[in-house]
Amino acid sequence: MPKPEFIYVTYIETTPEKLWHALTDGNFTERYWFGARLRSDWKVGSSFEMVRSDGTVSDAGKVVECEPPRRLAYTFVNQSDRYRNEFPALATFVLEPYGKLVKLTLTHEGFAEGSKFFEGISKGWPAILSSLKSILETGQPLEIPYAALKLDS
Amino acid sequence: MTFDLEPHGSIVKLTVKHDNLAEGGKTFLGISEGWPMVIASLKSILETGRPLPSDLKSSSQKEPARA
């Protein structure tokens, strides 16, 4: 059985610089990422955290690559009991400009077979990245009910 | 080809499944490039009233990435 890997490709009418900002600025991520602020100094080897509105850390890992505005990679794993014993998997974002568009490719890999966290991110990323595209193109994020992710099913 | 539409309040979750394709075949490789573009443009036209600019076409031709 192949190891699980998540790949998502989308096209956004924006610039690589704006997309980079949207992916790395905590004040901005809070608006479209189910309220999560990303926290890091974005230096390779530094910590990477997703911070909830109450200040607690939901996910944590490390920055692996940072080449603005083209390539960003970090590891993370959710800190809840549900995913204990799971290792941080590697998420890599590649930004490729084509005229007025940017092609965004996210590859999330390094999961163990049968990983529950893989199931979780497979439901979470499409919602987050869809909202990201909306906020960059319309100025408004999507209002996706958390329940729509069906994380418990 | 299966399109599944699931309403959630003011949004719709669209799930597109294209199966029964030979692994690594030309059709699979083609649609893997094609669907993300079509679906990204579909989302834009529904949300902004405009499809994505035609710059989209150049991306499948692997033109120099620097804009």
Image (cartoon, coloured by chain):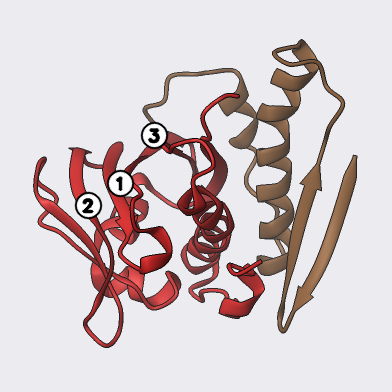
Chain colours: A red, B brown
Gap between marks 1 and 2, in whole Å? 6 Å
Per the image, the residue denoted by label 2 is A61
Vertically, is B59 above or below A32? above
User: Could you tell whether A28 is left or right of A128 in the image?
Assistant: left
Q: Are marks 1 and 2 on the same chain?
A: yes
Q: Chain of mark 2?
A: A
Q: Are marks 3 and 1 in contact (CB under 8 Å)?
A: yes
Separation (CA) of disc 3 from disc 2: 13 Å
Residue at mark 1: A88
Marks 1/2 in contact by CB < 8 Å: the verdict is: yes
Q: Give neighbour class at mark 1: few <14, some 14-19, many 20+ (Cα, 10 Å).
A: many
Where residue B55 appears, as percent x and y from the top left, is 59, 36
The residue that label 3 is drawn on is A110
Quarter in which the N terminus of chain A is drawn: top right
| Amino acid type indicated by mark 1 | Pro
Q: Give me the chain letter of mark 1.
A: A
Q: Earlier in the sequence, mark 3 or mark 2?
A: 2
